[in-house]
Image: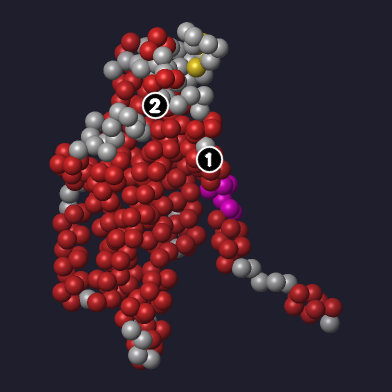
Amino acid sequence: MENLVAITDVKPETPLQRFSRNYFSSRIALAGFVLLLLIVLAAIFAPLLAPQNPYDLSQVDILDSRLPPGAHASQGSMVYLLGTDEQGRDMLSAILYGVRISITVGVTSTVIALALGLALGLLAGYAGGRVDNLIMRIADIQLAFPPILVALILLALMGPGIGKIIVALVAVQWAYYARTARSAALVERQKEYIEAARGLGLSSSRIVFRHLLPNCLPPVIAIAALQVASAISLEATLSFLGLGLPVTEPSLGLLIANGFEYLLSGKYWISLFPGIALVATVVAINLVADQLRDVLNPRLQTQ
């Protein structure tokens, strides 16, 4: 009897507790999560953590141009821990602000692309027929071209800017979510609970949003987590080529490009440290996304 009482006193795990236990069972995923958390916090609190505002001309001294790591400012007692760039900006401050911009662009473009692709994918999978054919043919055309080529063409037409590069990144991402959501919707709409909902006379919109959407979200979210890293990498590439963000709002890609011409002269730190920050951010997101994918869909776990 005591054992029976002890068993009945055990509270079942909530979905959040079960997810946390499964997710943090991997040490690699935990390390990636901690690293990503530190990077995100550094980006959020960049104005408080950065020794200077690198985009405030009143705080930048051109006499401190291209100083090596650990050098002292020509005026004042400030120490440039990671050196300065060609404009005399503190590299540590520029990296903190650059990470902030890169993550903002990557997350914003991914969220918008996810919402657009998910809506179109669910519509195509549930409606079928001509609607499905039209949406999927447009997605196929978009996927037939390399993402960087589509983004380059769009930015060449629109010009640089945060809003414009987000539009370009959304344009190259939405098709991934649309195809994934459509595949999941095709499977789910044949199941008994959807047939039962139809039999009860529920409207199509209620069936899609109350029943179909929750069951199609996990694979789409797993892809979205990976696409954040891809979006940040693509934005860095475009900015490196001079077609991404303007000089007044440099991301990590533009910071790397600013120091590229000085590599042969030994001014390695101008490109090296932003490059390390970019790699660390992308690797941390990928580690988190890989474990998230395995937890949401155990069948995709790597052996």
Examine the rendering and report whether any part of residue 188 can be seen: no
Amino acid type, residue under disc 2 in the picture: Tyr
* Highlighted range, magenta: 24-31
Give the left or right position of residue 20, taking residue 153 as reference: right
Residue under numbered circle 1: 41
Identity of the residue drawn at 32% across and 29% down: 248
Identity of the residue drawn at 45% across and 54% down: 302
Which quarter of the figure is the N terminus placed in? Answer: bottom right
Circle 1 Cα neighbour tier, 10 Å, few/some/many (<14 / 14–19 / ≥20): few
User: What is the number of callouts on the image?
Assistant: 2
Choose between 237 and 7: the one closer to the eye: 237
Q: Position of residue 159 (x, y in %)?
A: 20, 38
Task: Look at the numbered disc 1 and give the secondary structure of its residue.
Answer: helix
Q: Position of residue 142 (x, y in %)?
A: 18, 54
Identity of the residue drawn at 75% across and 78% down: 8
Q: Position of residue 272 (x, y in %)?
A: 40, 23
Amino acid type, residue under disc 1 in the picture: Leu
Task: Look at the numbered disc 2 and give the secondary structure of its residue.
Answer: loop
User: What is the number of the mark on residue 55?
Assistant: 2
Residue 211 position by quadrant: bottom left
Quick check: is 21 in the magenta stretch? Answer: no
Foreground label between 1 and 2 = 2
Choose between 50 and 25: the one closer to the eye: 50
Prevailing SS of the magenta stretch: helix
Distance between the alpha carbons at the discs numbered 1 and 2:
20 Å
On screen, residue 302 above or below 51:
below
What is the residue that sits farthest to the front in this orientation? 58
Give the left or right position of residue 34, taking residue 201 as reference: right
